């Protein structure tokens, strides 16, 4: 054996393990050479790979932000420095303040409703056989662009029931429970005993008496609107202890009839509602028959006769969904239709990780399904619900497409939001890029707190 080997063997056998073996010499590349990162990559190599992304980030994000902040401090054409005057314009202009108010409504309502619907859909689809198909159907609107969705809902909200789906449904339900007007557009003959009253009705000036027919002549009905098969009107026979009369179209083709007189050939108006009114209260009512005659009981004696507006109102055309009062809720509904599927998919993924043992234990302990949902499912899904809500809040702050496409010109100002106002002020006729830049800065300031909250939340979850 070599001397060194003998010495090493002797030390190992006789040392009793009391002396530690000398550390091995450093291998090649360890302890000397260029510095490496944790991942084993040289810093300059990482910088080379990150450089294209950093350049794009600077060109597409950092530079536009800096330039927008700078541009917001100049006038419309960018030639004069005006400081914060553009921001003063933003908070004093009525149209822009409407956009701010609508943005608040969007941020409060749209994420909350979409997240709630997504939660309900995610929970319910776990309990049905066709849950996968239902998820596919609900998520499918996400595949549609905002432009296409805007066009779709512009047609859905069309005022004409023959074109708009929403009003077609509303009109069908309305007509199921409410009778249409018998003779829309009809009115009393001028200088007759009937006078216009509140709500579109017509009331007689004199009171009704028994034994004297109270005839009610009407005009304003085109001949082609008179129901087919309408009979000729006939005078109502007087009856003691009752109020009688005739409702008819006081017009004879050719114009040969006399006003207020039932002439041969003049048509009866069947189905007209006649009310007897005393002290503002309806005490009796009747409908005219096929020959135009009607009969009211003795209680109607001394009362005034009224033809309610329901006889003359035009055909029900539905709801003006895109009018000034409903345009913003209508557009929010279309947004929820698109994004509820997004919320459902994320929440369903989180729900798959919820321990089923907790739910089963709660049921064994006597909790009903609502208590399980409220006390166990929702708290365990809270992190996912926050992610969905925050994502949707950031999304609605920059909503533009749906509002621009769905809202008609007559009510676009009522549906205005900040992103749309930014476009209108800068390029859509306002030609004031200073004010548009100020709106952009405000949008950035509104988004920043939400982004900071989201980043902190992600970091907290990463440390767990």
Image (cartoon, rainbow, N blue to C red):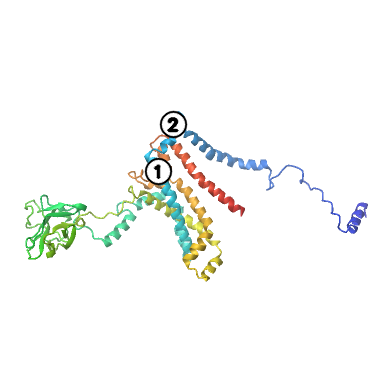
Gap in angstroms between the C-alphas marked 1 and 2 = 22 Å
Q: Secondary structure at mark 2?
A: loop
Q: Taking the image as drawn, is residue 449 in sight?
A: yes
Label ID, residue 165: none
Q: Secondary structure at mark 1?
A: helix
Q: Quadrant of residue 161?
A: bottom left
- As drawn, the residue found furthest toward the front would be 279
Foreground: 78 or 90?
Answer: 90
Q: Residue at x 53, y 56 (%)?
A: 383
Q: Residue at x 59, y 52 (%)?
A: 460
Q: Are marks 1 and 2 in contact (CB under 8 Å)?
A: no
365 to 259, vertically: above or below: below
| Picture coordinates of residue 131, whole percent (x, y) | 47, 64
| Picture coordinates of residue 389, whole percent (x, y) | 49, 52
Q: Is residue 335 left or right of residue 190?
A: right
Q: Is residue 373 left or right of residue 41?
A: left
370 to 382, vertically: above or below: below
Label ID, residue 99: 1
Q: For label 2, count other residues whose C-alpha is less than 10 Å away and answer few (under 14), some (14-19) or many (20+).
A: some
Q: For label 1, count other residues whose C-alpha is less than 10 Å away and answer few (under 14), some (14-19) or many (20+).
A: many
Q: Taking the image as drawn, is residue 145 in sight?
A: no
Q: First in sequence, mark 1 or 2: give its number.
A: 2
| Picture coordinates of residue 233, whole percent (x, y) | 10, 60
Mark 2, residue position: 75
Foreground: 79 or 43?
Answer: 79
Q: Quadrant of residue 170?
A: bottom left
**Numbered label tally:** 2
């Amino acid at each position: 054996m070599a001397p060194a080997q003998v010495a090493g063997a002797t030390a190992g056998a006789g040392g009793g393990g009391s002396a530690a073996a000398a550390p091995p010499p450093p291998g090649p590349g360890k302890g000397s050479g260029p510095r490496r990162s944790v991942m084993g990559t040289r810093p300059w190599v990482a910088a080379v790979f990150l450089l294209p992304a950093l350049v794009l980030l600077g060109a597409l994000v950092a530079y536009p932000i800096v330039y927008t902040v700078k541009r917001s401090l100049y006038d419309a054409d960018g030639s004069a420095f005006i400081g914060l005057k553009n921001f003063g314009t933003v908070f004093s202009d009525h149209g822009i303040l409407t956009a701010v108010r609508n943005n608040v409504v969007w941020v409060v309502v749209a994420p909350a409703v979409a997240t709630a619907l997504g939660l309900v859909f995610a929970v319910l689809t776990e309990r049905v056989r066709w849950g996968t198909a239902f998820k596919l159907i609900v998520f499918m609107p996400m595949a549609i662009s905002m432009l296409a969705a805007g066009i779709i809902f512009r047609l859905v909200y069309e005022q004409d029931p023959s074109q708009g789906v929403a009003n077609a449904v509303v009109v069908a339900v309305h007509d199921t429970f409410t009778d249409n007007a018998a003779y829309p557009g009809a009115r009393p003959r001028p200088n007759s005993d009937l006078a216009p009253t509140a709500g579109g009705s017509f009331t007689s000036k004199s009171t009704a008496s028994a034994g004297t027919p109270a005839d009610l002549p009407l005009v304003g009905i085109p001949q082609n609107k008179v129901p087919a098969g309408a009979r000729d009107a006939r005078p109502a026979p007087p009856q003691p202890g009752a109020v009688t009369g005739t409702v008819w179209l006081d017009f004879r083709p050719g114009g040969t009839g006399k006003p207020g007189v039932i002439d041969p050939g003049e048509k009866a108006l069947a189905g007209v509602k006649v009310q007897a009114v005393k002290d503002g209260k309806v005490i009796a009512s009747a409908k005219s028959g096929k020959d135009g005659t009607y009969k009211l009981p003795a209680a109607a004696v001394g009362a005034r006769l009224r033809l309610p507006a329901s006889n003359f109102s035009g055909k029900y055309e539905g709801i003006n969904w895109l009018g000034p009062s409903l345009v913003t809720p209508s557009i929010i509904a279309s947004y929820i239709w698109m994004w509820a599927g997004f919320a459902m998919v994320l929440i369903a993924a989180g729900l798959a990780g919820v321990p089923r043992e907790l739910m089963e234990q709660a049921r064994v302990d006597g909790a009903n399904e609502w208590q399980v949902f409220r006390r166990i499912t929702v708290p365990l899904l809270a992190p996912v619900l926050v992610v969905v809500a925050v994502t949707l809040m950031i999304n609605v702050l920059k909503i533009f497409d749906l509002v621009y496409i769905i809202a008609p010109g007559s009510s676009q100002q009522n549906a205005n939001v900040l992103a749309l106002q930014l476009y209108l002020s800068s390029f859509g006729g306002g030609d004031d890029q200073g004010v548009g830049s100020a709106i952009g800065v405000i949008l950035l300031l509104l988004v920043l707190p939400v982004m900071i909250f989201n980043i902190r939340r992600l970091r907290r979850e990463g440390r767990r």
